[in-house]
Amino acid sequence: MFLIRPLVASVDMILSLYENNLPMRFGLILYSSKFIKKATIHGLHLSAKDNDGETEEDISSLIIRLFIYIKESYGTQTAFQFLSNVNRLRMLSDSADDVPETHHVDEAFVETILPKVKSPPQDILLKLAKEQTYKELSQESSMFVFKLGLNKLQCCLLMNGLVFDSSEEVLMNAMNDELPRIQEQVYYGHINSHTDVLDKFLSESGISRYNPQIIAEGKAKPRFISLTSGVLGGESVLNDINFLHSSGTVDDVKPVTHLLAVDITSKKGINLLHEGIRYLVEGSKGARLGVLFSSSQDSDLPGLLLVKVFEITTASYSHKKNVLYFLEHLCSFYEQKYILASSVAAESTQTFIDKVYDLADANELPLKVYKSIVSEFSANKVKKQLNKVSQFLYLLLGLESGVNAVITNGRVMFPGDEGTFLSHDLHLLETMEFKQRVKHIGEIIEEVQWQDVDPDMLTSKFVSDIIMYVSSAMATRERSSESARFEVLNAEHSAVIIDNENSSVHIDAVVDPLSATGQKVSSLLRVLRKYVQPSMRIVLNPMSSLVDLPLKNYYRYVVPTMDDFSSTDLTVNGPKAFFANMPLSKTLTMNLDVPEPWLVEPVIAVHDVDNILLENLGDTRTLQAVFELEALVLTERS
């Protein structure tokens, strides 16, 4: 699947590969970057129908409209040929601009459908100019790309859900990498003639939106902070937060917590707040949302009133059915009348108050409460609270005044340009953080027996808070580059599982049982099981084929016993290894396998410990040797 703007030449490459019978099916998702830019500036929130007439159609949108018409009327291959014709006419023109002009598009349209129609193609063009259906489909195609977060990539290749560059070389390499994966799935019977391969791959590990900042693609590592320091030692801003939930989930434990740091005086901040509310309206069963309001400059009275109304509403009516719609419409009104409008055209404070009353009444919220809020309102108290939050954000995050941020269980993100961080990004952030960090922490905390805690305190908010604080604290710990995520292993028939429900230690081991390392590790695991008593999962991972004998040495791990003293006298029983039923005619060795810096030598040995033939020992059936650690080589590291 190629995602392209109609003005690029990738379509010729696609047609060439198609005509040469490349074993791949091709599709196109067309979009207009100009339309997306205008739509986000006008705050149209992904509604193609609402922005009809708001934005002037550009060349890309025109091409998409005509492409959709030709595809529906004359087939996909003819529609592809139309795009190729547009590109050819553009290249043949003498224009210095690399972008096709309207007459190139019209001429390509006429040339493409002329052999297939009875009426003049020009008449069809005039008719399509007035047809709204194709215009709406064109806008929906562009907004679909915007929802996926792929519009900034200009032109890209989506192969079974993976994102690549759109060049032919990258396409061929990606196909060669993908084919073995498909062949393996066919071999194991996971894919057959009735399987939709694309749906299968997308359902396994697909994400709903492409945002490199969230999925941590590239060298930049996510930034984490511990929220525990923000609640210890007295009064804290975090203790004052009241959370919003999706409808019908107020009493559920939420393992994921989004904290939005919002500058009430900035367009970007109000847009972030709006998208946060929209995120809950769309529905989230596993996350809640809190807001930390601050101000980079003196806020006007409507802005201060918005903060106060928001705080009272979340504190008292977050369980109400229509509370999210009330806040969403209130934020939209404030954004349109007081943020986007010029200072001259901005509405009066009374207009905002009247809107609060109207929306409260329309959404079945108690009107008397909001009237009392207005009558008892103190601008100085709200400003003091905004300053307190600003200081908290500076001390916790080092954030300067006016910076907007999203804090998800300790992970800090700074949204980019306005209009590019959407409710879909919050859904993606929730999914990524839950799978990678929060899921196992939440499961452990929900099973805790809170014996010394007042039962009245054991609310869903209490448990959600604990998960938020613990996961944020653990996220700040550096993970070794050599560590691995063993939770991805799923071995039903090749794993040895030793459960110990009371153990605080769990060990995962992947072992090749017919290897020298496997022999050593097995002994270590026995020692750990005896003295630490962990829960263990040992996944057996042998070589698929063997050319030579896999093992030429057999090991016993030597460790001092817990009881060093004999039960009969005061002699000390040292560490020892015992091998039974050894072959008599084979040459054996009793050398120790010790770390390289250790110098270990036999100090008592009747026979050569490197060349042992048991059949030459006569009636002696036990061979003994005493080894001594003579020296250690220590290396200094600066």
Image (cartoon, helix red, strand yellow):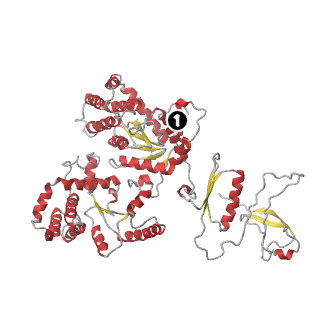
Estimate the x, y position of residue 552 in percent, counting from the top left: 70, 73
Question: Horizontally, is 549 left or right of 96 in the view?
Answer: right
Tell me if mark 1 has few (under 14), some (14-19) or many (20+) residues whose alpha carbon lies within 10 angstroms of its own: few
Quadrant of the frame with the N terminus: bottom left
Name the residue nearer the viewer: 341 or 29.
29
In this orientation, does residue 258 appear? no
Estimate the x, y position of residue 595 in percent, counting from the top left: 71, 63
Mark 1 secondary-structure assignment = loop
Residue type of the residue flagged with mark 1: Val
Residue bearing mark 1: 231
In this orientation, does residue 477 appear? yes
Estimate the x, y position of residue 46 in percent, counting from the top left: 29, 48
Quadrant of the frame with the C terminus: bottom right
The residue located at (38%, 63%) in the rendering is 196
The residue located at (57%, 55%) in the rendering is 480
Name the residue nearer the viewer: 541 or 242.
541
The residue located at (56%, 49%) in the rendering is 477
Farthest front residue?
194
The residue located at (44%, 33%) in the rendering is 388
Name the residue nearer the viewer: 542 or 378.
542
Estimate the x, y position of residue 629 in percent, counting from the top left: 79, 62
Q: Quadrant of residue 275?
A: top left
Question: Horizontally, is 120 left or right of 232 in the view?
Answer: left
Farthest right residue?
569
Q: Quadrant of residue 131?
A: bottom left
In the rendered view, tell whether residue 197 sits above or below residue 410.
below
